[in-house]
Amino acid sequence: MSALPPGYRVRSATADDLDDIHRLVAACERDLFGLSRTDLGRIAADFARPGLVPESDTRLIHDRTGQLAARAWVNRRCEVHVHPEQRGRGLGGSLLAWAETRARQTGATRIVQTVPDSHTDAVALLRSRAYEPMVTEWLLEFRMTEEPAVPEPPAGITVRPFRAGDEADTHQLVQDAFDEWQQRRMGYEEWARHTVERPTFAPSTSTLAFAEGQLVGAVISLNLPDTDEGYVEQVAVRRDHRNRGIARLLLLSAFRAHHQRGRRTCSLGTHSDTGALNLYLRAGMTVRYSSTVFRKEL
């Protein structure tokens, strides 16, 4: 780590720090977007990423009062957050330099980080360190003044909410569908930590599609505690059943279920590698904000 301001100290993170990290990330999101979208389950799932060694792959910076001022982790990609009240003191640059050094130590040939386009200071920092844009991400929203209309299922397709016992088949479907763009498959345990084992997982608003008893489509929903919105974490349709309107059917079914539970907005994230943006726009969603995934060759 490069020199920090007087009184600041750095150490690695432990599981006991997850609540503080969540509060830090939430503060950053509220500053940028007006609300927080990251729940504690997401923080815990990232902390448990396969191959991430907290002692060597995480860093926390505390200020002179003992408050968490910034944090970072690196494991194939990296995340850096600096509390809004602590910006402008070089903490982000120090953590980013550390992340690059740590990535080189592990033998990585590149490092990537996602930054909201509205966070102009962070974008400028990355560009000053030779990061280049790689992928665009969007957060989309669906506002519901009335209960959404849901189309009739295609012939031979049935839809129902997620039930206990659907976990393994849903994991297989999602990984097969995402193989077309994701860099690596998630094993079941890692996937489950981000979805069905997350405390905010919402099975009653997660929808599944079946053809002849076989799972062919899935929408995984969350209830994020710091918002009054529903959130769609994943959308997947089996390749041989695409272009039949199944994804739109599952989305609108999930949106209706959220509406019936008092939510008036649903959101989801996607990025340019998936090719799904037009699908969501045709379903009536609009872009709330965009982010850029930057990469640097090491």
Image (cartoon, rainbow, N blue to C red):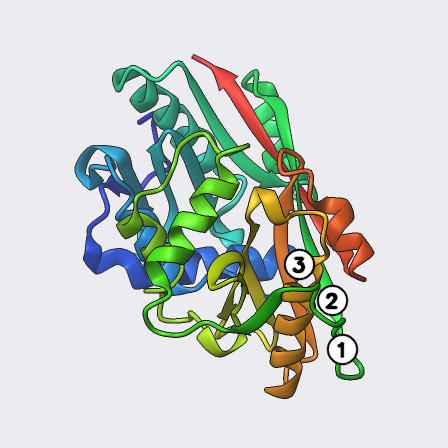
Residue 190's mark?
none
- Between residues 51 and 182, which one lies in front from this camera angle? 182
Image marks 2 and 1: residues in contact by CB distance under 8 Å: yes
Residue 138 point in image, percent of width and height: 68, 47
Frontmost of labels 3 and 1 is 3
The picture quadrant where one finds residue 8 is top left
The quadrant of the image that shows the C terminus is top left
User: Foreground residue, 170 or 29?
Assistant: 170
Q: Are marks 3 and 1 in contact (CB under 8 Å)?
A: no
Marked residue nearer the N-terminal end (2 or 1):
2
> Mark 3 — residue?
246
Q: Within 10 angstroms of label 2, few (less than 14), some, or many (20 or more) residues?
A: many
Secondary structure state at the residue bearing disc 2 = strand
Q: Amino acid at mark 3?
A: Ile
Badge number at residue 148: 1
Which residue carries the number 2 mark?
142
Q: Are marks 2 and 3 in contact (CB under 8 Å)?
A: no
Relative image position of residue 86 (x, y in whole percent): 48, 48
- 176 versus 189 height, above or below: above
Q: Residue 64: percent from the left, percent from the top? A: 31, 51
Name which residue type carries label 2.
Answer: Phe
Residue 7 shows in this picture: no
Name the residue at 23% across, 35% down: 51
Binning the other alpha carbons within 10 Å of mark 3 as few (below 14), some (14 to 19) or many (20 upward) gives: many
N-terminal-most mark, 2 or 3: 2
In this picture, is 7 found above or below 83? above
Please name whichever residue, 186 or 156, is drawn nearer the observer in this view of the structure. 156
Height in image: 225 above or below 56? below
Query: Is disc 3 placed on a helix, strand or loop?
Result: helix
Whole-number angstrom distance, CA of label 2 to CA of label 1? 10 Å
Q: Residues within 10 Å of mark 1 (few under 14, many from 20)?
A: some
Question: For the N terminus, which image quadrant?
Answer: top left
